[in-house]
Amino acid sequence: MLATLPGRMMDYPLTLTHLVERAARFFPKSEVVSRQANRALNRVSYAELMKRVRKLANALVAMGVKPGDRVATLAWNHHRHLELYLAVPAIGAVIHTLNLRLHPTEIAYIARHAEDKWVFADATLLPLLDKFRHEVPWIRKVVVMRDEGDPAVPPEDAEYEALLEPCSDAFEFPRLDENAASMICYTSGTTGNPKGVVYSHRSMVMHTIVACMADSLAVGERDVVLPVVPMFHAAAWGLPYAAVMAGSNLVFPGPHLDAKSILELMQDEKVTIAAGVPTIWLGILAMLDAEQGKWNLGHVRTTVIGGAAAPPSMIQGFAERHGVVITHAWGMTETNPLGTLARVKSSLAGDPAQELRIRSTQGYAVPFVEQRHADEAGKILPWDGETMGELEVRGPFVAKAYFSDEGSDRFTADGWFKTGDVVTIDAEGYVRITDRSKDVIKSGGEWISSVQLENALMSHPAVLESAVFAGRHEKWDERPIAAIVLKPGQSASEEELRTHLEGHFAKFWMPDAFVFVQQIPRTSTGKFLKSKLRASFGEMLIGK
Ligand code: ADP
C-alpha cells in the first residue's frame, strides 16, 4: 500500500553540506577575494577555503557546539564569514547573523532571544560587542576575527586563526535532516520587536537553486559575484551559497562600502554580478556620472538591486550612460529573501519605454513562490494593474511562522505570509509596490503612492535622493511631504520640482511641502527611514 511506503525517507536530503563537498571537488581553483579593514585584499582559493571550513567544523565541535545550537556572527562580508556560513550549518548547528547596524540594546535583545552561545566577531567590531556582550548570559565564548592593524584580541577571547591552526582539515560531515534549521535572521523590527526567521537546510537549498536559475539571478561558474548587501542581512540575498554551489569567484567588500571602494573592486576583480540596496547604487551612479570614462565596468553582466524600490531613472541611467543592466528584485527576510524579480518576458520586449516600465516593477514571483494580493477584509483582488492590496506570498522558502511563534497574525489560515507591502498586480503577473503599509499616505481616505512620487522626483537631474512621507493634516488626515537631497553643486527650487511632477499625477498627489535635507535618514539595512522623517517634519502642516 502506498501509505506504508517510507517515501520521504527514501529521498536524499537537501542540505548545505553538499555545497562544501561539491566546491572542494569541482571548483578548487575558484577564488574568494575579501577587502580587509586595513584595505588590503585577502585571496583564498576554494580548495584552501573548504579545508578551512573543515578545520572550523572540527574547532566548533571541540568547543562544544551541538546540533541546533546558535552560533552568532558580528561581521562584515569576508571569507571568514563565508567559512562560518558553511561550517556552522554543516555540523547541524544554526548560524545567527547579527545586524551590526542595530542599536546595541537591540542586538542584545536579539542575541538573548536566539540564545546565542558563541559569537564570532570582527576585531574592528569589538567596541560594539563590548556594549552588549554582558547583557547576553548565554554567551560562552567570543572568537575574534582579526587582520593586521585591527584591534588586539582581549585575553578572555579566542582568536579565529589560532583556533583553526591546530585542527585537522579532515571532517566527516553528519547526515542531516533537511528540515533542520541552518540559519536564523531577525527582521529589523520597525514595527515592534525584531522577530526571528529560521531557514531550514531545505529552504536554503531550494532558494540557492532558484537563485542560480537562468531567468533568476543566473549565477554560474564563470561569474564573479560581489555581494555588497551584507551577510548579516537576509543571508546577503543567498548569493554566497549560490556562488559556492555554482563555483563562481566571490568578492567581498569588508567594511568599505563607499562608492569608490566598490567601483574599484568591480573594475579590478572583473565583477560580473553585484548586488545591493538602491542607496548604495545611487551613490555609485552619481560617481560614474561625475567621472565619465574613468571606470571600466565592461565585465558587469547585471547589478541586482532590491530591498527598496529602484527608481526608474536609476535603472535607465545605469543602462544608457554606463551600459550596466539592472535586475530589480523584491524580497524580505521572511522570503529567504528572493520573492519576485523583474524580467522582461520576450512577448513584452522591443519597446524601450515599455521595457523600462517593466524593469521598474518588482517583477513576478520566482519558481515555487506564489503571489496574490488581498484587501483589508482578506478578499483576493484582481490582477488588473490598478487595484491596490496587501501582497501575500507562500512557498518552500517563505517563512511559515516566526521563531517562538510570535507575530502569528502575519500568516493566513491557508499558509500565506502577509508581507505588509501594498501593491498592484497586472494581468501578466508583474507586481508593483506602491508602499509599505506602515508608510502609506492616506489623504481624505485615498491612497497616495510615496514610491511613485519618489521615483518621479529622483528623475529630476538635480535630485540625488528623495523620500516622500505622510505629514499630519487637519482636514485630510495625511498629506505628502517630500524630503529632497540635491546632488553636490546642483540646485532646484520647490517650484521647479512641482513643475517636474505636474501632469504625471492627479492634483491631490502633489506634495504639500518640500524639505531640503543633507541626507535621508537610513534604517539598519540602508533603506530610507521614513519614521524618522515623520518624527522630524510630520507636524509641519498643522496650522497651515
Ligand atoms: P527591513 O526592511 O524591515 O529591514 P527586509 O529586508 O526584510 O527588512 O525588508 C523587506 C521589505 O523591503 C519589503 O517588505 C519591502 O517593503 C521592501 N522591499 C524589498 N525589496 C523591494 C523592492 N524591490 N521595491 C520596493 N520595496 C522593496
Image: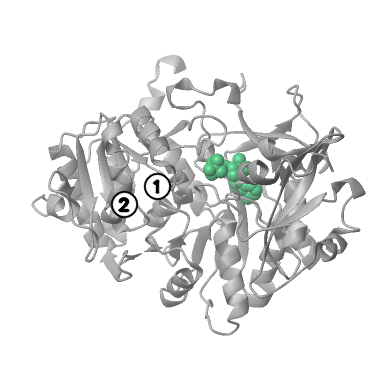
- The amino acid pointed to by label 1 is Leu
Quadrant where the C terminus is found in the figure: top right
Q: Is residue 297 above or below residue 95?
A: below
Instruction: Give how far across and how far down residue 190 sits, in percent.
Output: 55, 37
| Discs 2, 1 touching: Cβ within 8 Å | yes
Report the side of 486 relative to 477 (left or right).
left
Give the image location of residue 84, x and y in percent: 29, 47
Residue 145 position (above or below residue 321): above
For the point 41% across and 57% down, which residue is it? 243
Query: Ligand 1 lies in which image quarter?
Result: top right
Mark yes or no: residue 494 visible: yes
Determine which of the numbered discs, if any, sits on residue 125 in the image: 2
In the image shown, does 325 or 163 lie closer to the viewer? 163
Q: Is mark 2 within 8 Å of ligand 1?
A: no
List the residue tagged with mark 1. Answer: 100
Name the residue: 48% across, 33% down: 194
Q: Residue furthest bottom?
A: 293
Q: Residue furthest left?
A: 166
Q: Nearer the viewer, residue 366 or 80?
A: 80
- Mark 2 secondary-structure assignment: helix
Instruction: Say left or right for 64 vs 524.
Output: left
User: Looking at numbered disc 2 in the image, what kind of residue is underneath it?
Assistant: Leu
Q: Position of residue 148 (x, y in %)?
A: 21, 66
In this image, 112 relative to 236: left or right?
left
